[in-house]
Every structure is written in structure tokens, then in C-alpha cells.
Amino acid sequence: MIFNNMKYIFITILLISSFTNAKSLIDKYPAYNYVLSEFDIETGYIYDYEFEEFVTKNEKKLLRFYNHSIARGDYFIPIIKNGLLNNNLSDLLVYLSIVESGLKSDIKSHKKAVGLWQFMPSTAKHYNLEVDKCFDDRCDPYLATKAAIKHLKHLYHKFGAWYLAIIAYNCGEGRLAKAIKKAKTDDLRTLIDNDTKLLPKETRDYIRKIILLAMIGESSNISFDKTYPNLVKVEVGGGTNLKTIAKLIDMSYKKLLQINGKYKKGKIPTQKYSYEIFIPESKMVTFYKNYLLPPRIIQKHLLVSYHVKLGDTLETIAKKFHTSIEDIKLTNNITDDFLTLDQLLVIPTD
């Protein structure tokens, strides 16, 4: 009898403590309800004692991480959020990128995942992100975000809830499907229960980390609209060094390199006449005042005639004659990629 009474008292104390902790979270993070609903999580999750325990242990560390990430990668926020919203996804998925990379565009994990969304080489290839010795599309904020959106849509379509898509992003589709089958439910608390360990600890903490960071970020933005700097694309000549551009627009080379992490060692490739880079919108006028593209020179010495055949494109013709699309367009004064059957082209080749 005494034992039962003690057990009842202990459970009561736990419930009161849990309610008090949850109440403090609600007061501290008034956006919690919005965050949970955006991730398809029921509101009562705020009372989950394992989540409260996670917050108690990691809150200060994650707050510092959030502030450092935003300070370092503030230029990427508009790109990611606009990409998500334009594809009818919640802009709160930006916190997934923050957790993955700390908004460092060229970050590389020990597992060889790279970029803002930490794509592995196989996933990058699947979503047509090019990687070679000169550049890495996984470090391009626009291209990587576009690929991440496709991947997240696929995961959401397969599992039917955003918290499940986020979990699968971390541990993989097969691992999550196996956990759901074993648990006989896709309930969040069941899947990430620390006792049953249906999913790896990294994954259990991953979803909690994203929820907490989203609560921190969205609650801090309730009273005012935080604005982030915008990036614009400009064209520079092949072979250009980003150090030259940084000096020309009076900008930190380190920051310009961070924005353009896709170009390895800050060097623009030489395969094409020109490439696009990102610069801050505030530097655009200075750039166009001080930078001119180098004169266009075709290096090929042989010109051959060619009649366009059915199925031909500028790309297939360029590959056939070992030349570039840009050189074909320049030689023939073509401004678009449209070709007509039997059209006569002059092809520069070596």
C-alpha cells in the first residue's frame, strides 16, 4: 500500500514537473504551435518529457549555433526560403539546411556529403548536380536548394508527413520504413523513443534539434520582420579569380568565396567564355561600373558547314564537333537555342 502511494506521488511529481517545463517552453517560444503544425506534429508534443529533456541539455548550445549560422549565412536565407515558398513548401524547412550545414555553403562531412543541404555524391548525381575538379553544384545555393526541394517532395509524398520526411532525410527511406513497420505506427513519439531505439540516436536528436531551432528562430521573428541581404547573379569571364572580383567591388574575399563555394579555390573554370557568380545586391552598381567581360575570342581555327538534322540540338552538335554551344552561337549570330530542320550552320572546330 505504501509502495503504491509512493509510486502515485512520484508519477504526480513527474507530471507536475513536465507541465511546468512545458509551460516555460510555451512562454519562451510563443511560435511553438506554428512550428509543430508546419511539421505536421500534434501540439501536445510540447509536453513530451524526452523533448523537454533534450531542450534542457541543448538549448544554450543550439542558440549559439543558430546565431552563428545566421551571421555566417544570412545571404542564403532569402534564396532558400523563396525557393521553398515558390514550390508550395513551408519556409520552416530552412532549419533543416541550418542543422545540416550551419549555412556554410562548402562544408564537407566525414561521409563526403557536401554543401548547404549535405548531398552525398550519389544523391547529387540523381538530382543532376554536377561535380568535377573545377566546381561542385552541391555548393551552389540555388541549384542545391532546387535539388533539396525535389528530394523533400519525394520523401513527403512517400511518407505523408513533414516530420517523417525530415527523419528520412537524415536516416534514409529504408531505415525509416523499417522502423515504422517494427513499431506498427508512424507516431513521432514512438519512432524517436529513447528506450526502444527504433531509430539511431543521431536521427532522434536530429528531428528534435530542427524543432527547437525552428522554435528559437520563429519566436525571435514574431515582433519584427527580420530582413536579410539579397544576392544577384553577374557574369564574369572564364578563368577569373574571385580575389580580383572581391577587390574590384571592395568586398571581403573570404565572404565572396563563401557565397560562391561551388568554384573550387576561388577560381572560375576556363571551359566556357563566361560563368555566373553571386555578389551582394548592394555591390551590383560597383561591379558594373568597374568590370567588363573580356573580348570574345574563338580559339578554333577550322570552320565546317553543317545542315541541321532531325533531333539535333546545339548541345549534340557541339559534342559531335568537339566545340562549345557558345562558339556555335557566336559564329552564326544565334541568340537562342532554337534550330530549324536543314538550317545551315558554320561550326568552329579544331
Image (cartoon, helix red, strand yellow):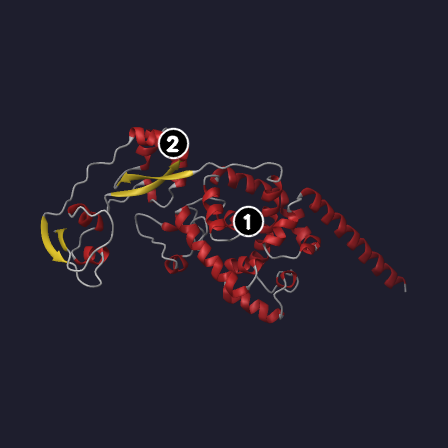
Above or below — where is 37 with respect to 216? below
What residue type is disc 2 on?
A: Lys
Q: Could you tell which of marks 1 and 2 lies nearer the N-terminus?
A: 1
Query: Which residue has dot 2 on it?
Result: 283
Q: Is residue 312 left or right of residue 87?
A: left
Q: Is residue 223 left or right of residue 70?
A: right
Report which quarter residue 162 is drawn in.
bottom right
Q: Nearer the viewer, residue 342 or 166?
A: 342
Q: Is residue 328 visible?
A: yes
Above or below — where is 202 with respect to 116? below
Q: Secondary structure at mark 1?
A: helix
Q: Is residue 114 visible?
A: no
Give the crowd class for mark 2: few <14, some 14-19, many >=20 residues within 10 Å. Answer: some
What residue type is disc 1 on?
A: Leu
Give the crowd class for mark 1: few <14, some 14-19, many >=20 residues within 10 Å. Answer: many
Q: Position of residue 143 (x, y in %)?
A: 39, 50
Give the residue drawn at x 27%, y 45%: 269
Give the residue drawn at x 62%, y 63%: 191
Give the residue drawn at x 62%, y 53%: 37
Query: Which residue has dot 1 on it?
Result: 92
Q: Nearer the viewer, residue 35 or 137?
A: 35
Q: Position of residue 264 (x, y in %)?
A: 34, 44
Q: CA distance from mark 1 to mark 2?
A: 29 Å
